[in-house]
């Protein structure tokens, strides 16, 4: 109880904050700068997406290093219209990144002059269009390793060395919160466990060089063959085990075929890349239920046969999902973004009913699922009626996605424990708990929307939020 009282003091003392730059669990989608399978303006992108990668900035000449980007005229007859829509998305809290390369346009930075040209041309694009970050989607020959280059920690292939130098030059001219992400193919990352030559393992020098700078890396779990996991077993694309094993290779680290250890990334730096539909890629499409089963294992540490995580308790900070692409998702009626947004929003907290009659009263049952990594921790489920943004900073460093108001204190009042049953408690061995809201008849409060979120002591972990509406 003393820790609850301390938290109450900190909530009172906390001042206003700015909204988080990006959510803890992101949904990333690529937008086509061409007209297939549809022509889509940025403002028509589903609300479910947190990050939009613009595909693509490309070299001015084949296999060049000087980059260019012009908005697709079918969607944007003028560049100013595109710039305005980027700003509109940003005003709505979205992040808009420029992605470079793609499957059809290798970017080759082969010299000091190329590195300078890459940095200066990309800086101009970022400045002109106001992008929030850069996504590296280089494929094919962009990072083709030369014979004799055997150590990703000290690369010798010119197009790898000079790309790293060019990217360093670019980032040095941009603010620290400029987002950096990457979308390598499996062969270029996890493929380094079976070979380190040509395209195999060729992204490892870049990932290693910028490992503390990457906000997230979403390897493409599609258009790939079978791949080794860090346990030495072979996994088949489109399966739960494949998605778990490929993600865990980055989080757990692995040994390259050369015997050099590739150190782990942090869980919050890793996401899974998936095709939005069967038409979006040649292979690798996975139905949402299987994707969610994979995420249950990665995020919550749910035990299962097959591939075993490097950390059996899972990774609550796992970042989320990427898709190729927004256009294909919209073409299929949002069949990708809708179920996956719902999963990411409810993975830690869900409620069995979103509405309760204010006239007659009723109950709402909450499921708290923080995962095995958080087993045994004390939880505090809080409620408010003034929304979720900008949120409330907690003494452990987390930001509760809930604005503290007069209703919040009722949860901590022992006299109201029958109304807020189980709101204060301890997670079980699976990192789970339940709580119940018992609403008496209160007709004057009809139309009030209540927001709920919980934190774990010592207040360094927060859940997503859910809403319950009091209807007439």
Image (cartoon, rainbow, N blue to C red):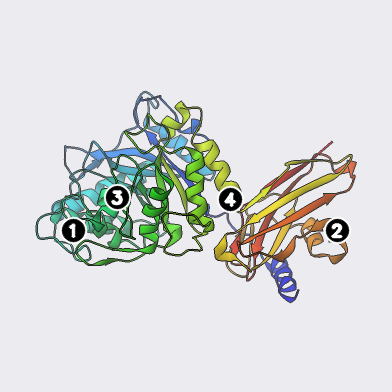
Q: CA distance from mark 3 to mark 1?
A: 27 Å
Q: Earlier in the sequence, mark 4 or mark 3?
A: 3
Nearest to viewer (mark 2 / mark 1): 2
Near-viewer residue (369 or 237): 237
Q: CA distance from mark 2 to mark 4?
A: 26 Å
Q: Earlier in the sequence, mark 2 or mark 1?
A: 1
* Residue 258 visible from this viewpoint: yes
Residue drawn at (71%, 51%), measured in percent from left and top? 366
Residue ID for mark 1:
161
Q: Are marks 4 and 1 in contact (CB under 8 Å)?
A: no
Residue ID for mark 3:
227
Q: Earlier in the sequence, mark 2 or mark 4?
A: 4
Nearest to viewer (mark 4 / mark 1): 4
Q: CA distance from mark 4 to mark 1?
A: 41 Å
Question: Which secondary structure lies at badge 3?
Answer: strand
293 relative to 437 in the view: left or right? left
Q: CA distance from mark 2 to mark 1?
A: 64 Å
Residue drawn at (51%, 56%), measured in percent from left and top? 299
């Amino acid at each position: 109880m003393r820790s609850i009282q301390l938290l109450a003091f900190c909530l009172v003392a906390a001042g206003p904050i700015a909204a988080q730059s990006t959510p803890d669990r992101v949904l990333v989608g690529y937008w086509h700068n061409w007209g297939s399978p549809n022509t889509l303006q940025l403002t028509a992108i589903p609300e479910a997406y947190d990050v939009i990668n613009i595909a693509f900035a490309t070299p001015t000449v084949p296999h060049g290093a000087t980059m260019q980007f012009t908005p697709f005229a079918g969607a944007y007859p003028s560049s100013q219209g595109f710039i305005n829509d980027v700003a509109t998305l940003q005003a709505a809290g979205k992040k808009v990144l420029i992605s470079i390369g793609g499957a059809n346009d290798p970017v080759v930075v082969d010299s000091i002059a190329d590195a300078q040209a890459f940095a200066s041309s990309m800086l101009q694009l970022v400045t002109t269009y106001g992008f929030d970050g850069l996504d590296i989607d280089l494929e094919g020959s962009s990072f083709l390793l030369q014979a004799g280059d055997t150590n990703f920690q000290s690369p010798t292939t010119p197009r790898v060395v000079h790309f790293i130098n060019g990217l360093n030059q670019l980032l040095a001219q941009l603010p620290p919160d400029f987002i950096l992400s990457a979308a390598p193919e499996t062969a270029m990352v996890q493929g380094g466990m079976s070979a380190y030559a040509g395209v195999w393992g060729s992204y490892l020098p870049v990932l290693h060089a910028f490992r503390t700078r990457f906000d997230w890396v979403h390897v493409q779990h599609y258009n790939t063959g079978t791949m080794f996991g860090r346990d030495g077993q072979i996994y088949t694309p489109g399966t739960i085990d494949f998605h778990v094993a490929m993600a865990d290779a980055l989080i757990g680290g692995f040994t390259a075929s050369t015997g050099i250890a590739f150190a782990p990334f942090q869980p919050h730096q890793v996401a899974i890349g998936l095709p939005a539909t069967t038409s979006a890629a040649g292979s690798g499409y996975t139905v949402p239920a299987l994707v969610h089963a994979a995420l249950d294992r990665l995020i919550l540490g749910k035990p299962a046969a097959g591939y075993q995580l490097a950390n059996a308790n899972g990774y609550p900070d796992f970042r989320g999902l990427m898709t190729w692409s927004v256009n294909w998702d919209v073409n299929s009626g949002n069949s990708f973004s809708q179920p996956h947004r719902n999963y990411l929003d409810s993975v830690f907290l869900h409620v069995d009913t979103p509405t309760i009659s204010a006239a007659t009263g009723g109950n709402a049952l909450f499921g708290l699922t923080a995962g095995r990594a958080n087993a045994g921790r004390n939880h505090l489920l809080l409620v408010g009626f003034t929304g979720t943004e900008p949120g409330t900073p907690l003494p452990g460093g987390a930001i509760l996605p809930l604005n503290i108001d007069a209703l919040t204190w009722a949860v901590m009042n022992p006299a109201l424990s029958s109304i807020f049953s189980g709101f204060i408690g301890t997670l079980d061995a699976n990192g789970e708990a339940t709580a119940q809201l018992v609403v008496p008849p209160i007709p004057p409060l009809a139309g009030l929307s209540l927001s709920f979120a919980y934190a774990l002591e010592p207040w360094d972990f927060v859940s997503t939020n859910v809403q319950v509406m009091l209807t007439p």
